[in-house]
Image (cartoon, coloured by chain):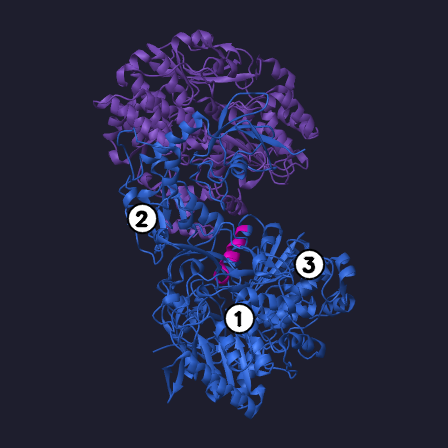
Chain colours: A blue, B purple
């Protein structure tokens, strides 16, 4: 028998632990009880009292007024949510609120989109009976910030903004100050928004029930004719966005509260950095380089040009003289099409993607150890973990919503281990920060494994039942030269031991890693050791554990799943295996290439050697983002045909023979797969900018032009083909994905998967690999002449090459790349904060402004490559991960000097 | 209340306490500088806005406190006694008026004329010695008042020899916790701070709550103007309190006990500090108490001036260095209290009873008093009585006896007794005979025993002005979190002010609506409690108040609970 309680004497089923408000809303609708201080993503607060209801406990019939938002439901409770007394109370509270609120609704920007207005109408307030008294109507507006606005004369002191800044973003920019009637919202130390340390996430503006805190876009949203749910492209978190639009104009973006990924939250990139979509710089026509100059041409002309050129090169040099680089920014369907075009139409395995330069070591390392190159768990597991180990990742800047979620867990008392050469925001919060020398992850991981095994902290049961090769592995670890490892990584062994204990003894420990693990000489090995750590401690296959790569681009996971790598096709089937090739041939109706394809660095090398003649890049600015720019330029110059599909004329475009103007994600549909294997629907918000086409459509057009019959780009139809081939997409259909997507593998009946490897690994037993630390050739060869180590990082406001974010107000918040330098180094070199310096490596030098900061240790420097003005990759090296060929952006031997 | 801030502050906890640190930063100039707050925030992994939010809340750390040298008491008793205007004037001849602040209240209600100067309180005859005090020639502001019991002597009896206490505590430490808890439950002891909640239930919840780290917190923020009985214990019987906390700590398995003493009681802070040192010297505090496995640290926290910190959730937020805003319940402090850990929060007088219960048994205590109000109660009588002071009476003692026998009648013509602090009932003198001093009698008659402080409202003090004072007090002390209290207290004060000073009469329905809104809608007892004395006044002083209302119709009936 289900437990019940009564609303207006009618019985309804109750749920254990819910509040009266939730109970009423569940049965009578979201707006049945008015509220002002309640929000779906905030804890009950109980300040507005608007949600008051009358209740009577069984037996003792006395009626009592309680705030329903924070009063737990009880069995057999009698609830009267709209008794006369309650209605009176709400109206009287509203009357009090209006004694200190401007009564200028008709001219207010929030008119028609104001919770206060709605609730006032709901409670039926007619007039304010109080004589005019003290009020706060003369508070000035704050328009100092690039996005955020305040008009605190409209503030009703519900504290929702303060709580959003605390409970959602964890930044504490906002606070209430003063007391009683004088209490008021402050930003920072009572400064303007621009002078505060606000990270512009906009959670406060979304939470505000009036127009007291808004942003520059919010008020426009009331003119929207459409609201479209889609998925952000700014990182692998996969935030759902609700985009308000009118015709072809995007008005504003909010984060849906019912989004499983982001629960009403997102960052400034997702929420505010959208104005690139119709920026004057957007490419609006195809171009062909004629007499050294790019000239606008028709789509027909460009298609004919490409088809003819590619056919010629193919017949002259064979299909392997052609290569394609697909994009993790594009949809699964588009990536699938690109690899299909390269393999089925061109006939080569020369297909790779930008995952090569970020998480290729993750895919490889996790495939070797677990059999599956994808996050083992889900972000939601953060709620249930006891210990978080963050290695080489700075999610508060690069994956802000996940970063904020991790921060929330740590602030509430969970253990955090950060292994990072930089003292990141989360490292400051960590109980254990192992600030290692860049490039020594393998040494630190081995030290951790050593202490875990020496102290007997391994999970013997898990090892026994789920792993192979433990005894040998154990011996190898125990034979390690601990003193040497300690010396190499520069971290006190006791600190490593403490961290190892914390990780191994936590009932549930979850690891996250980023490019600080992968973009190394020993990148794949670093990933494999993270997997080793998880396996020997039994942190696999349960909720709240696992190995979880933080994917940099919105669809890194998806691009790899779709076969965007030379050795594996869609679904990770080996192209060198005849049976698998045959399987693809069945669907594609043409022979599949067998010869091994080129990885991106190999493509550039082949181009420089004159072996690769044609390259098609879909959405990547390789000149700015690939390491060792000089070598990249040389490669591009050597090509006979270089096709670039882009939104903007990037630096790479300088070398292109053909430019194809693509549509942004706002202008097309498809699916993205986020870092937790969640396939989500991307929905077209506005029509493609005139003159542009969705990337997928362009590929389809060329396929047809080159004689392969491929139907028009249609995400739902494309998914059907993908589901035929990719086993873990078997149960995925456009309709089934719904609002929140599905996490692969998805079974035929549509059941998805939050946690991998629960019973066994794809390869049966997990494989432990032993790898010893080896110093990067970069520092071994160049360390003497270039004694500093430069490591690259990301800043919150910008995304990768910045081609999109630099064309938004984000550039007003952060307008250049900085070089972070420890105060000791700065003092030694006589370099002052804000000064420009010459940063040089064996490849060349750049000029960059210094920020003196303790974020790095002496001897280590750090910078971003968001801005073409610096072109940091002029100095990065050609050293790659020995296994997956991912460039080592994270260790560059440099020297630094004052600029005169 | 932020769970995040609770935990971040809890990382350093009581050893390096955030609230104390803010207080220290304010000590230099009266309010911490923004630079100092920024540095402190970094240390605690918090951001400066939160710390500024905290500092700007308290009377003695907010920016407006900068440069204040003398603080004059503005509590109800000093107000109706009419001593303060003259006092301010006199102080103004020695000190710039901008350097004169206010405090509420110094607990010198027995003689009034109270003020605070450089860490000492003065009252009564001190007004005549102002020059010497300001010049620091006189630094002794010690006051004297009558202390007497009219029944059992539990709290007013002298503290026994330490040997005896130590022997009793040695026994305690060998007694199972459940046995002690049984005895406390049997005693029927209820919270003396005003709410009257049985301490045994709280202790049981704490004992059963999950977690190894637990706290006992003594609410020594006796903020009710007119009350000074906790001050009596803090200054004259501090051992009863600290030993009581030790017993409570042992019973619930706590490791630390916090005494949160209001800044307005500098002498109390001194005696508690000294007494903690004595306990530490006698191995009755610290590690391995009396050689046992029980560890219990005492921590004295000096409050910074905010009445609302007498509310337990605000008090806990205060210790954490957060803005002391009232928190929603559940969770109750007994399961999630200080730094998110199970915490027993009780008033001074409540905890001070525990040694008696431990040594005499719960039954002996339960035999005292009347009905569900067991034991004794301290009553503080202000200067409206011929013999003001602190009196211990058995629960259930006729109020008439307290007034006549202990107070020896009124020192001036008095029309009402404000009993139980500003949120307590206004008892017209003719109702005195109907009341006995216990929770039930007061509730049944539509009043509130509260903390049992008694302030006499003089015959010639306009009731409307007294009510305005109560609204003003509420407006000043409201934390500002819940809408009814933050806005209602100000509007109430404005209505009463306008009615007295302008050609304006109050719409009785509006006033009634305001009281009902605050009463039913407020988050805590501050906003929720203030309508009680208002309604009492409207019921019993209609004739006096009529003129301020439209058509001479103040609407109200005596409230019966």
Q: Is residue B390 above or below residue B346?
A: above
User: What separation in Å lies between label 2 and label 1 (alpha carbons)?
Assistant: 41 Å
Q: Main secondary structure of the magenta part?
A: helix
- B536 or A255: which is nearer to us? A255
Chain to which the residue tagged by mark 1 belongs: A
User: Callout 3: helix, strand or loop?
Assistant: loop
Q: Do dots 1 and 3 share one subunit?
A: yes
- How many residues crowd mark 2 within 10 Å: few (<14), some (14–19), many (20+)? some
User: Callout 1: helix, strand or loop?
Assistant: helix
Q: Is residue A756 above or below residue A364?
A: above
Chain to which the residue tagged by mark 3 belongs: A
Compare marks 3 and 2 and give the one earlier in the sequence.
2
- How many residues crowd mark 3 within 10 Å: few (<14), some (14–19), many (20+)? many
- B296 or A900: which is nearer to us? A900
Residue B247 in the magenta stretch? The answer is no
Picture coordinates of residue A398, whole percent (x, y): 49, 63
| Magenta residues (range) | A397-408
Compare marks 2 and 1 and give the one earlier in the sequence.
2
Residue drawn at point x = 51 percent, y = 62 percent: A394
Which residue is identified by label 2? Answer: A109
User: From where the camera sits, is residue A167 visible?
Assistant: yes
Picture coordinates of residue A527, whole percent (x, y): 63, 68
Which residue is identified by label 1? Answer: A334
Q: Is residue A326 above or below residue A27?
A: below
Which residue is identified by label 3? Answer: A540
């Amino acid at each position: 028998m289900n437990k019940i309680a009564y609303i207006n004497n009618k019985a309804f089923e109750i749920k254990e632990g819910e509040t009266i408000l939730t109970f009423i809303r569940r049965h009578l609708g979201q707006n049945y009880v008015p509220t002002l201080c309640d929000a779906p993503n905030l804890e009950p607060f109980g300040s507005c009292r608007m949600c008051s209801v009358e209740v009577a406990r069984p037996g003792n019939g006395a009626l009592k007024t309680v705030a329903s938002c924070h009063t737990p439901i009880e069995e057999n409770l009698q609830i009267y949510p709209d008794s006369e007394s309650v209605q009176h109370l709400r109206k009287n509270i509203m009357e009090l609120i209006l004694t200190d609120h401007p009564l200028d609704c008709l001219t207010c920007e929030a008119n028609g989109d104001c919770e206060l207005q709605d609730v006032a109408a709901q409670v039926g307030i007619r007039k304010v009976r109080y004589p005019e008294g003290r009020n706060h109507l003369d508070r000035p507006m704050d328009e100092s910030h690039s996005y955020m606005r305040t008009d605190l004369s409209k503030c009703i002191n519900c504290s929702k903004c303060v709580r959003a800044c605390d409970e959602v973003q964890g930044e504490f920019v906002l606070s209430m100050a003063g007391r009683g009637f004088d209490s008021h919202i402050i930003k920072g130390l009572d400064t303007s928004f621009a002078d505060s340390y606000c990270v512009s996430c906009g959670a406060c503006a979304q939470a505000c029930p009036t127009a007291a805190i808004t942003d520059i876009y919010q008020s426009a949203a009331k003119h929207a004719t459409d609201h479209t749910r889609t998925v952000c492209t700014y990182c692998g978190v996969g935030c759902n966005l609700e985009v308000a639009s009118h015709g072809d104009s995007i008005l504003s973006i909010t984060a849906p509260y019912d989004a499983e990924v982001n629960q009403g939250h997102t960052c400034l990139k997702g929420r505010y950095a959208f104005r690139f979509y119709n920026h004057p710089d957007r490419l609006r026509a195809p171009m062909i380089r004629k007499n050294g100059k790019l000239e606008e041409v028709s789509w027909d002309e460009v298609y004919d040009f490409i088809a003819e050129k590619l056919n010629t090169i193919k017949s002259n040099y064979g299909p392997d003289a052609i290569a394609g680089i697909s994009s993790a920014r594009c949809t699964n369907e588009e990536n699938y099409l690109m690899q299909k075009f390269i393999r089925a139409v061109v006939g080569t395995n020369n297909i790779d993607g930008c995952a090569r330069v970020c998480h290729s070591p993750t895919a490889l390392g996790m495939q070797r150890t677990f059999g599956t190159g994808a996050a083992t768990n889900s972000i939601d597991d953060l709620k249930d973990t006891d210990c978080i180990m963050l290695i080489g990742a700075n999610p508060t800047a690069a994956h802000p919503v996940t970063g904020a979620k991790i921060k929330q867990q740590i602030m509430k008392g969970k253990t955090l281990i950060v292994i990072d050469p930089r003292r990141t925001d989360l490292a400051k919060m960590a109980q254990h920060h192992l600030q290692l020398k860049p490039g020594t992850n393998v040494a630190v991981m081995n030290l951790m494994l050593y202490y875990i095994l020496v102290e007997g902290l391994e999970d013997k049961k898990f090892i026994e039942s789920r792993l192979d090769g433990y005894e040998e592995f154990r011996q190898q670890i125990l034979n390690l030269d601990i003193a040497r490892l300690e010396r190499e990584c520069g971290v006190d062994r006791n600190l490593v031991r403490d961290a190892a204990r914390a990780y191994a003894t936590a009932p549930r420990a979850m690891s996250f890693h980023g490019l600080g693990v992968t973009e190394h000489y020993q990148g794949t090995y670093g990933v494999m050791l993270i997997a080793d750590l998880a396996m020997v401690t039994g942190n696999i296959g349960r909720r709240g554990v696992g190995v979880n790569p933080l994917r940099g681009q919105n669809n890194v996971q998806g691009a790899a799943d779709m076969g965007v790598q030379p050795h594996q096709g869609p679904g990770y089937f080996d192209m060198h295996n005849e049976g698998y090739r045959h399987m693809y041939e069945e669907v594609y109706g043409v022979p599949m290439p067998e010869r091994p394809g080129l990885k991106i660095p190999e493509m550039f090398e082949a181009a420089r050697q004159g072996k690769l003649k044609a390259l098609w890049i879909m959405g990547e600015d390789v000149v700015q983002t690939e390491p060792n720019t000089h070598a990249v330029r040389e490669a591009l110059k050597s090509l006979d045909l270089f096709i670039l599909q882009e939104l903007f004329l990037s630096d790479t475009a300088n070398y292109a023979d053909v430019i194809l103007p693509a549509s942004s994600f706002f202008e097309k549909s498809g699916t993205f797969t986020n870092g937790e294997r969640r396939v989500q629907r991307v929905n077209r918000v506005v029509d493609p900018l005139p003159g542009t086409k969705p990337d997928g459509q362009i590929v389809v057009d060329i396929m047809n032009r080159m004689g392969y019959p491929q139907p028009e780009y249609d995400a739902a139809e494309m998914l059907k083909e993908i589901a035929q081939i990719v086993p873990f997409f078997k149960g995925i259909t456009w309709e089934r994905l719904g609002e929140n997507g599905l996490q692969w593998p998805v079974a035929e009946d549509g059941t998805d998967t939050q946690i991998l490897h629960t019973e066994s690994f794809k390869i049966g037993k997990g494989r432990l690999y032993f790898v010893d630390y080896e110093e990067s050739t970069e520092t071994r060869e160049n360390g003497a002449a270039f004694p500093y180590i430069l490591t690259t990082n990301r800043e919150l406001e910008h995304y990768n090459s910045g081609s999109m974010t630099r064309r938004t107000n984000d550039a007003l918040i952060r307008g250049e790349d900085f070089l972070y330098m420890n105060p000791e180094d700065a003092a030694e070199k006589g370099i002052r904060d804000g000064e420009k310096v010459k940063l040089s490596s064996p490849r060349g030098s750049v000029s960059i402004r210094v920020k003196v900061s303790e974020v790095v240790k002496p001897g280590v420097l750090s910078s971003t490559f968001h801005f073409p003005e610096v072109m940091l990759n002029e100095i990065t090296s050609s050293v790659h991960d020995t296994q997956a060929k991912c460039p080592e952006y994270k260790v560059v031997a440099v020297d630094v000097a004052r600029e005169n | 209340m932020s769970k995040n801030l609770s935990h971040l502050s809890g990382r350093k906890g009581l050893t390096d306490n955030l609230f104390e640190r803010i207080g220290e930063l304010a000590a230099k100039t009266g309010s911490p500088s923004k630079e100092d707050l920024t540095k402190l925030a970094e240390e605690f992994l918090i951001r400066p806005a939160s710390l500024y939010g905290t500092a700007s809340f308290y009377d003695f750390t907010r920016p407006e406190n900068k440069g204040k040298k003398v603080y004059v008491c503005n509590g109800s008793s000093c107000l109706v006694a009419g001593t303060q205007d003259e006092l301010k004037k006199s102080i103004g001849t020695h000190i710039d008026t901008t350097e004169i602040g206010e405090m509420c209240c110094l607990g010198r209600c027995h003689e009034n004329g109270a003020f605070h100067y450089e860490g000492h309180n003065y009252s009564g005859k001190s007004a005549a010695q102002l020059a010497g005090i300001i010049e620091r020639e006189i630094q002794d502001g010690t006051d004297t008042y009558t202390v007497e019991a009219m029944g059992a002597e539990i709290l007013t009896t002298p503290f026994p020899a330490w040997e005896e206490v130590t022997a009793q505590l040695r026994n305690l430490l060998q007694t199972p916790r459940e046995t002690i808890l049984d005895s406390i439950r049997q005693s029927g002891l209820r919270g003396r701070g005003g709410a009257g909640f049985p301490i045994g239930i709280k202790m049981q919840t704490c004992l059963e709550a999950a977690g190894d780290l637990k706290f006992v917190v003594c609410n020594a923020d006796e903020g009710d103007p007119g009350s000074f009985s906790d001050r009596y214990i803090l200054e004259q019987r501090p051992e009863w309190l600290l030993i009581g906390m030790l017993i409570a700590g042992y019973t619930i398995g706590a490791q630390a006990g916090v005494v949160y003493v209001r800044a307005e009681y500098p002498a109390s802070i001194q005696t508690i500090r000294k007494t903690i040192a004595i306990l530490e010297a006698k191995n009755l505090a610290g590690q391995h108490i009396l050689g046992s496995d029980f560890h219990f640290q005492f921590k004295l926290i000096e409050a910074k001036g905010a009445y609302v910190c007498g509310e337990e959730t605000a008090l806990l937020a205060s210790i954490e260095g957060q803005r002391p805003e009232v928190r929603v319940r559940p969770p109750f402090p007994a399961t999630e209290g200080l730094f998110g850990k199970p915490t027993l929060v009780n008033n001074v007088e409540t905890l001070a009873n525990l040694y008696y219960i431990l040594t005499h048994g719960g039954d002996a205590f339960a035999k005292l008093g009347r009905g569900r109000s067991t034991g004794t109660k301290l009553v503080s009588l202000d200067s409206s009585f011929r013999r003001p002071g602190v009196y211990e009476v058995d629960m259930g003692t006729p109020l008439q006896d307290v007034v006549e026998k202990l107070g020896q009648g009124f020192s001036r013509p008095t029309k009402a007794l404000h009993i139980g602090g500003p949120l307590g009932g206004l008892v017209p003198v003719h109702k005195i005979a109907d009341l006995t001093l216990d929770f039930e009698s007061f509730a049944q008659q539509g009043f509130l025993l509260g903390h049992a402080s008694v302030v006499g409202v003089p015959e010639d003090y306009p009731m409307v002005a007294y009510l305005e004072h109560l609204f003003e007090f509420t407006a000043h002390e409201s934390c500002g979190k819940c809408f009814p209290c933050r806005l209602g207290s100000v509007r109430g004060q404005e209505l009463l002010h306008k009615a007295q000073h302008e050609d304006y009469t109050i719409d009785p329905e509006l006033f009634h609506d305001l009281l009902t809104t605050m009463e039913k809608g407020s988050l805590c007892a501050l906003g929720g409690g203030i309508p009680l004395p208002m309604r009492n006044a409207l019921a019993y002083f209609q004739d006096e108040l009529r003129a301020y209302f439209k058509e001479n119709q103040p609407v109200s009936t005596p409230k019966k609970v």
